Amino acid sequence: MTHFASSENDPVYTRKQYGLFSQTVQSFCQYTGLSPDSLEKHCCNSAGFLFFPPYHGQMIRLGIALFGVSPTLDPQDVRSRGLRPVMSIKGRIKHLKTLPPDFCVGYGSTWVTRRETRIAVIPIGYAQGLFRSLSNHCDVLVRGKRAKCIGTISMDQIMVDITDIPGVEKGDLVTILGQDGNDEIRAEELAVRANTIPHEILCSFVRIKNRITV
């Protein structure tokens, strides 16, 4: 076996890797007298599985695609194969408050209200795996609608703007990662906004215990 290093973004290098692997298998078979067909050969990680079908060999080693998430930042790569996300992160609103205009929200005053603003507090933060770099740069789903995360993400909570979502109540379920109604927050989207890869988004939530549903 071998492992592709750049199958998600460098087809030239991947083809070179596969060529070297094939040459190694051929040399091994010439030395041992074994038939190449008698060997179990495998190279493909998730990106290899998605983008290089001729290289599948006798086995493939799915990683992130097994979770229904693309190894690239494009969800269509897995959607086209009928793969759907199996992981979701949800929390419940623990507090609601209406703030006046020109009111600072969160540490460092990184968000200031421009109008009377209804906010909801959800008990998840960077201690549970939600990157602080997503502060003011991510959405959540409340009652099937998008609500913007406002202010700096705290250790154990985030604040979201629910001004334009009617009927929100304390205890309502909030989707941080996953689907609610016709909309969906995907790991690929969070990765783009956090300037990272989907793998890191999924791994970061391992620390979650009881307060969030996985």
Image (cartoon, helix red, strand yellow):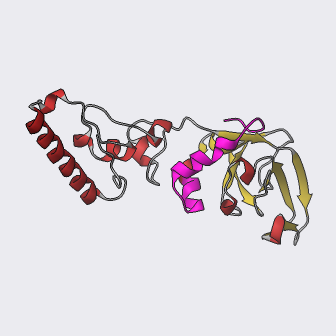
Which residue is most to the front?
Answer: 31
Q: Position of residue 212 (x, y in %)?
A: 74, 39
Magenta residue check for 190: yes
Residue 34 vertical placement versus 157 (above, below): above
Q: Position of residue 187 (x, y in %)?
A: 56, 48
Residue 42, x across and y down, in percent:
28, 37
Q: Quadrant of residue 184?
A: top right
Q: Quadrant of residue 34?
A: top left
In-image side of 12 versus 137 (left or right): left
Q: Is residue 91 visible?
A: yes
User: Would you say residue 161 sits in the magenta stretch?
Assistant: no
Q: Is residue 86 left or right of residue 83?
A: right
Residue stretch in magenta: 189-214
Q: Looking at the magenta stretch, what is its main secondary structure? A: helix
Is residue 140 or residue 106 the one in the foreground? 106
Q: Residue at x 71, y 62 (%)?
A: 135
- Residue placed most toward the observer, 63 or 92: 63
**Residue 112 appearing in the image:** no
